Amino acid sequence: MSKKKQYMVVWKMDIEAENPIDAARQARKIHLDPGSEAVCFEVTSPAGVMMHVDLQIEGEEENEIEGEWLEDSKSGRFKRVTTTHEASTWVCKECGKADVDPYESGCDSCGAEPESY
């Protein structure tokens, strides 16, 4: 059984309202409606990788949360994962920080050294 992880999930939409409370109430009503098409979210993994998730196309490759593994760096301290259908990022395998540069600066979060050429 896999251990659950903490994700940040954000749902955004533009709403015309009289005030912030009215806007929040309208958003809540839309969100609770089972027939609502407000099913797109920004999900950030514990490693800091942000993905756009559309539950109407759940399971398709555009919705790969955590990112699909693409490759490891030469030393194995870093991995490259997908962030969207056409983009990727390097992640430090020691601390999980995303958007690191394994060849120039390494990881400024945990101090993992950059790869040697």
Image: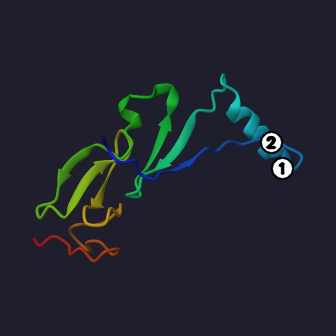
**Residue at x-position 32% and y-position 62%:** 96
Q: Quadrant of residue 40?
A: top right
Residue 51, above or below 55: below
The outermost residue toward the front is: 1
Q: Is residue 78 above or below residue 33?
A: below
Residue 4 pos. (x, y %): 40, 47
Mark 2: give few (<14), some (14-19) or many (20+) Cα within 10 Å.
few
Res 78 → quadrant: bottom left
Is residue 32 toward the left or the right of residue 94 in the image? Answer: right
- Coordinates of residue 59 in the picture (x, y in percent): 39, 28
Check the image and tell me how it is coloured.
Answer: rainbow
Quote the CA–CA distance across marks 2 and 1: 6 Å
Give the structural element (helix, strand or loop) at label 2.
helix
Residue sitting at 24 percent across and 74 percent down?
112
Task: In the rendered structure, find residue 50 and report the number of the disc placed on it.
Answer: none
Residue contact at pointers 2 and 1, CB within 8 angstroms: yes
**Amino acid, disc 2:** Arg
Residue at which label 2 appears: 25
Q: Residue at x 20, y 75 (%)?
A: 113
Q: Which of these two is toward me, 111 or 105?
A: 111
Q: Which quadrant does the N terminus fall into?
A: top left
- Residue drawn where x is 85% and y is 45% of the image: 22
Q: Is residue 60 above or below residue 9?
A: above
Work out which residue is located at the far right of the displayed protein and give it: 18
Q: Position of residue 53 (x, y in %)?
A: 48, 38
Residue 6 left/right relative to 11? left
**At numbered mark 1, what does the secondary structure look like: helix, strand or loop?**
helix
Identify which residue, 95 or 38, lies in the foreground.
95
Q: Which residue is outermost to the top?
A: 35
Q: What residue is pinned by disc 1?
A: 21
Amino acid on which the number 1 mark rests in the picture: Ile
Q: Residues within 10 Å of mark 1 (few under 14, many from 20)?
A: few
